[in-house]
Image (cartoon, rainbow, N blue to C red):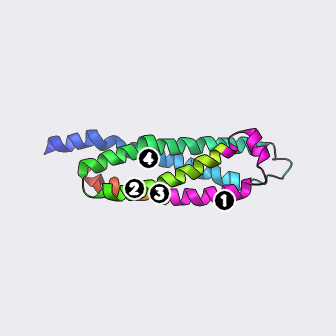
Amino acid sequence: MLESCKTAKERWGGVSEIIDRWLNERQELLVTYCKLSGLNAFDEDKSEAVPERVQAFCQILVDYISAGHFEVYEQLLKEGKEFNDGGLELADKIYPKIQGTTEVLLNFNDRFDTTAHCNDLIDQFPSELSVVGQVLEERFTLEDQLIEVLHNSHKELMV
């Protein structure tokens, strides 16, 4: 029994660290989003800084999405398979919804990822950023559901 606990800790001990690091990235993404949403694109003192800040936001956004898809979700699914307690069925319903948000967010990135794109689309930026905020809120809710069903419900068993 002690050996199985040790094995579980070795196998899943790093998952919490991965999730913690990812949630810290989420916080950074939100802070950057809030700062960006507070910019007035038509304020002459700040107009040159807008494209740079948008590009920084796009980079953090893509990094966050990538970490989710290629690191966090993968580990959560492995954990769900190990415990095989129904979490994978819920994940199968949640994941396509997360994928839908990924497409919207990456489309935003593609539209605003360069200075030229930002300058060309500056009039559309406030409304598109608003949509991004709504999509991020939806995504975070879905991701939290994944963490709850595939990780937190087993947390005590992995210590």
Residue 159 seen:
no
How many residues crowd mark 4 within 10 Å: few (<14), some (14–19), many (20+)?
few
Residue 49 within the segment the image draws in magenta:
no
Label pair 1/2, CB-CB below 8 angstroms: no
Q: In this view, does 35 lie to the left or right of 25?
A: right
Query: Residue at label 2?
Result: 146
Q: Distance between the residues labelled 4 and 2?
A: 14 Å
The stretch of residues the image draws in magenta is: 111-140
Query: Residue at label 4?
Result: 20
Where residue 25 appears, as percent x and y from the top left, is 52, 45
Circle nearer the N terminus (4, 2): 4
Pick the front one: 107 or 4: 107
Where residue 150 appears, as percent x and y from the top left, is 33, 54
The residue located at (81%, 42%) in the rendering is 48
Secondary element under disc 2, as helix, strand or loop, is: helix
How many residues crowd mark 3 within 10 Å: few (<14), some (14–19), many (20+)?
some
Where residue 75 appears, as percent x and y from the top left, is 36, 44
Secondary element under disc 3, as helix, strand or loop, is: helix
